[in-house]
Amino acid sequence: MTTQIYNTREDWLNAFIDACRPQFDRADAPLPINVRVAVGFTSKGSRGNRIGECWSQDASDDGHFEIFIKPTLNETARICDVLTHELIHAAVGLKAGHGPSFRRVAIALGLEGSMTATTASAKFYAWALPIIEALGPIPYAALHGSMNTGRPKQKTSLLKVECPACGWLARVTAKHIDAHSHLNCPVPDCGGVLIEEREEVGE
């Protein structure tokens, strides 16, 4: 692979897609040709926790899988493992969700953890980092804050927490989470522990 200068982050990411096609072939999950990627907010918006999303080719006027990567991500390797997650959706079909077909390919490509929020393992880095290094720097900078930069920043932010035992949801201040090793679920006779909502990698 010849190192070149990419003018846009989308050009760089599409080059990554082309370079990782052999990895998908080896995982017995060839990537379709009709795949595009863009950096932009997912259907959950700028405040949502979804950091990647793959739209079906049926939703596209010209029949392409459209992948979106949330622009708040700031590490190239992380961007690429999120992109790989979304490419698996395109390879196995969105109807497969995060089920057995998705899981098989994800593990083969070195993604691990919960299939709805995968992270990269050493196996992923072994094949992905040489591609990233060969492509060179991505023309990209993460977005932070809000569009209305003149507005005073809210000093107290509320974090979403959930009890996995009973499904109880609430929003609490960060200081309450920082001040306690854990927060008990207030539902009588539940006995669960509240956990902060995690980032999602979407369909």
Image: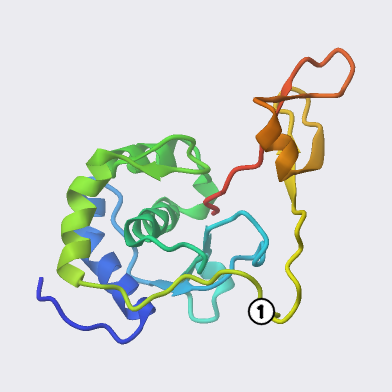
Q: Nearer the viewer, residue 35 or 188?
A: 188
Judged from the image, the secondary structure of the residue bearing numbered disc 1 is loop
What residue is pinned by disc 1? Answer: 147
**179 to 109, vertically: above or below:** above
Residue drawn where x is 42% and y is 71% of the image: 37
Q: Can residue 158 be seen in the rendering of this structure?
A: yes
156 vs 77, left or right, is right
Three-letter residue code for mark 1: Met
129 vs 163, left or right, is left
161 vs 84, left or right, is right
Give the percent coordinates (x, y) of residue 178. 66, 36
Quadrant in which the N terminus is drawn: bottom left
**104 to 166, vertically: above or below:** below
Give the percent coordinates (x, y) of residue 186. 86, 24
Residue drawn where x is 78% and y is 15% of the image: 191
Q: Can residue 64 be seen in the rendering of this structure?
A: no
Residue drawn where x is 50% and y is 43% of the image: 117
Looking at this view, name the residue that lies furthest to the bottom.
7
Quadrant in which the C terminus is drawn: bottom right
